[in-house]
Image: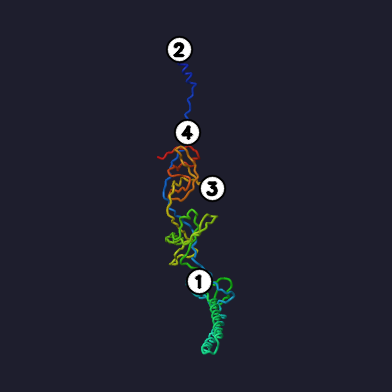
Amino acid sequence: MKKCFLALVVLASCSCGGNRKAAPVVTETGVLTKTAPATEASVRLTESFTSEIEPFKENDITPAASGVHIDRILVDVGDRVQQGQLLATLDPTQYNQQLVQLRTIENDYNRLLPVFEAGGISKQQIDQAKAQLDVQREVVANLKKNIEVRSPIAGVVTARNYESGDLFAQQPILHVMQIEPLKVFVNISEQYFPYVKVGMPVDVRVDIFPDERFTGTVSLIYPALDPATRTFKVEVRLPNAGGKMRPGMYARTIFDMGEKPGIMVPDVAVQKQVGTADRYLYVIKGDTVAERRRVEVGRQVGDKVDILSGVAAGEEVAVTALSKLYDGAPTQVRNE
């Protein structure tokens, strides 16, 4: 009887165990990622701009009168000229006629002067003769200015449009450029307006002289910004004593505007939003959750980038498995 009861208990026990299923073990694993801290650092503010070198000054050499013949042109393309130098003369026919008349009036006055001193003529008569002489002298002086074409600047002749004897029309006779010094115009983003100062040095690199460095100086900062581009215009004065550089050459101007405090993160952490210019990254909160942040990016320094807004120093940003992350994604940080 005992054996029978024991067998029933064992059988019942086996029967119950056969119907029971093991409960599943649920484990939630986040995206495995590595992080790097956002760190405070000093960021050197250097910016490079490509511009075209321009003459410091340039002038069209044009006479005051039109429809006159050019008597002589005294310079040619490539000649260096000084300020005030005589470059060309116009037909002197009218000038010569008035000069002859001046000589006649001078002789008449010189004959009348001793007569007046001897009392032979009145003061009114000698005064009239002197006034006529002064007027004629002014006429001759003005005509001389009109037939003498001089350079208003020191520079080099870059164009000649006539030959001696040609009739002057509308084109200037010559074109003169001042190439010592030269100048470069640069349009700079408004964020750098507080850092650019008149007199600050500027590193200049010219494309056709890759191994040479030139130094310019900020000579003028235009006071108004371009509302369309949010940039301001800067003029850089560029010494050119050796005459090596020429207007029209391309140059890179490099502005060193000092340092500013920055927040640096690895550049691989920053992603670009498809279809826009927006940048974003993932901040890992408590090693367990990814938080997507839109950021404003500044300068690249080596393999790190300056974050202007969106991340605070000390926050951890994801640097791997970025394609698997999304806002609110669970994460596991493995930095070893």
Q: Are marks 4 and 2 in contact (CB under 8 Å)?
A: no
| Label 4: which secondary element | loop
The residue indicated by pointer 2 is: 5
Estimate the x, y position of residue 4 in percent, counting from the top left. 45, 11
- Give the amino acid type for the residue marked by disc 1 in the picture: Pro
Mark 1–mark 2 Cα distance, whole angstroms, equals 131 Å
Which of the two marks, 1 or 2, is nearer to us in this view? 1
The answer to whether residue 214 is above or below residue 115 is above
- Residue 276's disc is 3
Mark 1–mark 4 Cα distance, whole angstroms, equals 84 Å
| Label 1: which secondary element | loop
Which of the marked residues, 1 or 2, is nearer the chain's N terminus? 2
The residue indicated by pointer 4 is: 28
The answer to whether residue 22 is above or below residue 244 is above
Mark 4–mark 2 Cα distance, whole angstroms, equals 48 Å
Which of the two marks, 4 or 2, is nearer to us in this view? 4
- Give the amino acid type for the residue marked by disc 3 in the picture: Thr
The single residue placed furthest to the top in the displayed view is 1
Q: Are marks 1 and 3 in contact (CB under 8 Å)?
A: no
Which of the two marks, 1 or 3, is nearer to us in this view? 1
The quarter of the rendered structure image containing the N terminus is top left
Estimate the x, y position of residue 20 in percent, counting from the top left. 49, 22
